[in-house]
């Protein structure tokens, strides 16, 4: 299994999630109702969790890849 390649894929997808977070933050600058703002904040929070999880998984995969290279 190519853990390093797999980690890079996770990092690429994490970057896409990060871009989506930034776009949603930009939307918050517009005039929104309280309900729209609350929904947007919830979406941002959910995406931030996904982003952190993806980076964590990528780190783990890189570590496994390095361990396999030593073997």
Image (tube, rainbow, N blue to C red):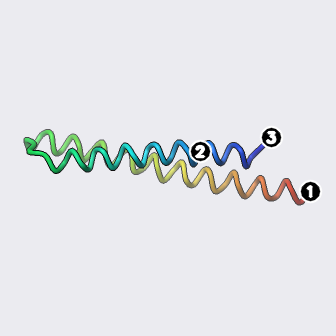
Q: Mark 2 — residue?
A: 10
Image quarter (top left, top right, bottom left or bottom right) of the C terminus: bottom right
> Residue 1, labelled with which disc?
3
Give the mark nearest the N terminus, 1 or 3.
3
Give the CA distance from mark 1 to mark 2. 24 Å
Residue 53 % position (x, y): 51, 50
Along the line of sight, the residue nearer the viewer: 38 or 14: 14
Give the CA distance from mark 1 to mark 3. 13 Å
> Residue 58, labelled with which disc?
none
- Is label 3 in a helix, a strand or a loop? loop
Give the CA distance from mark 3 to mark 2. 15 Å
**How many residues crowd mark 2 within 10 Å: few (<14), some (14–19), many (20+)?**
many
Contact? badges 1 and 2 (CB < 8 Å): no
> Residue 71, labelled with which disc?
1
Classify residue 68 as left or right of residue 22: right
The quadrant in which residue 10 appears is top right
Give the mark nearest the N terminus, 1 or 2.
2
Residue 8 % position (x, y): 64, 47
Residue 38 % position (x, y): 18, 45
The quadrant in which residue 34 appears is top left
Tell me the residue at 82%/58% (across/down): 67
- Is label 1 in a helix, a strand or a loop? loop
Classify residue 37 as left or right of residue 21: left
Residue 2 % position (x, y): 78, 43
Give the mark nearest the N terminus, 3 or 2.
3
**How many residues crowd mark 1 within 10 Å: few (<14), some (14–19), many (20+)?**
few
Contact? badges 1 and 3 (CB < 8 Å): no
- Is label 2 in a helix, a strand or a loop? helix
Tell me the residue at 50%/47% (across/down): 14
Classify residue 44 as left or right of residue 30: right
Q: Does residue 22 sit above or below 39 in this rendering?
A: below
Image quarter (top left, top right, bottom left or bottom right) of the N terminus: top right
């Amino acid at each position: 299994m190519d853990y390093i390649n797999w980690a890079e894929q996770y990092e690429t997808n994490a970057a896409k999630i990060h871009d989506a977070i930034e776009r949603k933050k930009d939307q918050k600058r517009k005039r929104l109702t309280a309900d729209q703002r609350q929904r947007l904040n919830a979406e941002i929070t959910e995406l931030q969790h996904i982003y952190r999880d993806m980076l964590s998984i990528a780190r783990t995969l890189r570590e496994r890849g390095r361990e396999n290279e030593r073997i």
